[in-house]
Image (cartoon, helix red, strand yellow):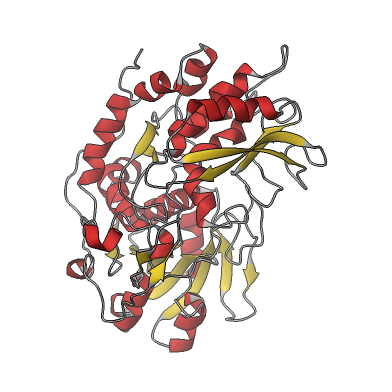
Amino acid sequence: MRRRNFIAGFTGLVGAPMLSGTAAAAGVSAADSAGRHGGHGRGRRRRRVRSGIEELAARDYDVLAGQRVGMISNPTGVLPDLTHEVDEIVRSGQVDLVAVFGPEHGFRGTSQAGEGEEFFIDAKTGLPVYNAYRDPERIGELYDEAGVDTVVFDIQDVGARFYTYIWTMYWAMVAAARRDKRFVVLDRPNPITGRRAAGPVLHYPEFATFVGERPISQQHGMTVGELAQLFNAEFLPDEAGTQVDLTVVPMRGWFRDMWYEETGLPWVAPSPNMPTVDTATVYPGTCLFEAGHPSEGLAEGRGTTKPFQLIGAPHLDHAWEEALDALDLPGVGFREAYFNPTFSKYQGRVCGGVELFVTDRDDFDPIHTAIAMLIEARKLQPDGTTFWRTDNWIDKLTGSTWVRQAINDGLGADEVVDGWHDELSEFRSVREKHLIYHQMRRREERD
């Protein structure tokens, strides 16, 4: 059983915008350091990747010269010494930084999921900080209010379509294109590697929301700089009527098969429920448990110390772990687990379920694993109860009705995954045109 191909919305433009420092993208800087690192169970030689902000600072912020600059950032916008880039830019005196724009969770990261920080004056820098979350039309008005010529984006993404920072970037690019502003992206690693795109592709426009505005795959396998190039070439001409004047400042020394711990860069939690790289590793799959009915379905582990790794519900017990263990899924193990969330679904109630342990990140497929988990959990759902959220949030997260309908119809995990084969293949072809970094590490560097 296979769906027809619904991928739509690409303009077919092949050209790429100006890219600063392209030749440096696959190189290794003199500051690279060697060492042993067991980030996911194997000793590996750790490189010191240089992020986009480091590359820009080393060039004395040349691409921002003579511009009134606004910056979209959050707590992840740090230099290797943990200094925040906004603080360092202000200290340098080399950039006319006039405003900051915060995404979901806010510039200083004080808000929970689905919230931003309202306008405030930053006590440390004296800069006005605007809330740029959710309201695409308002972003352009904020540019006008702040009087910016150039907008800079630098936020750590986690590699999943439904993580909203990339859509803040998208709408910020649209607003900049409509107002003839420049847009600069300071690139950072995809923490779960950029080896591949995986999962269903969003069906546009019927399933466009802020957890997926345009047709990209659920695990996109791109950096924010690469996504910006794709957005600019494929989507902005339709959305804004033109491309934006885009500059991407690439990283130096990043390879597509690098996990975040191998970059030598500090991990700052991108959001309150994304505390570790382990969380990010499972998130492209287990975020689907957000679609569980809030009083009868499954909880995704918010309100615990391991969100998206602890999954369960009051009606589940050891039977789910036993069913999942019998599947012998690659790269993952399951522990029977019980937890009592401090907030979110089932707050104050004991839930039974599982904790995911990724045993081999390279073999682990988070989306296939989550589909298998959903199928087995639904088999254990009590009669007469509702499994999915009534707003069909699962459709918004997966980008179509396919996953929900296929699971409801009793299909197996392999059949569900096969249903998005054609649209994923088409997206991969589009994605390939906009990649900045093309190299994997040599075998001796990986082992």
Residue 433 position within the rendered picture, expressed as x and y whole percent measured from the top left: 20, 46
267 on left or right of 52: right
Q: How many marks?
A: 0
The answer to whether residue 293 shows anywhere in this view is: no
Judge left or right: residue 55 versus residue 309.
Answer: left
- Give the x, y percent position of residue 23: 17, 68
Image check: 103 left or right of 191? right
How far from the left and from the top, in percent, is residue 292? 64, 29
* Residue at left offset 28%, top offset 25%: 422
| Residue lying at 23% horizontally and 57% vertically, measured from the top left | 443
Q: Position of residue 287 (x, y in %)?
A: 55, 39
Compared to residue 308, the image places residue 321 above or below, namely above
Query: Residue 345 or 332: which is nearer the viewer?
Result: 332
Task: Identify the image quadrant of the C terminus.
Answer: bottom left
Q: Does the rendering let one see residue 432?
A: yes
Seen from the viewer's position, the closer of residues 78 and 379 is 379
In the picture, residue 19 is in which quadrant?
A: bottom left
Tell me the quarter of the image containing the N terminus. Answer: top left
**Which quadrant of the structure image shows residue 415?**
top left
For residue 316, above or below residue 137: above
> Viewer-proximal residue, 113 or 118?
113
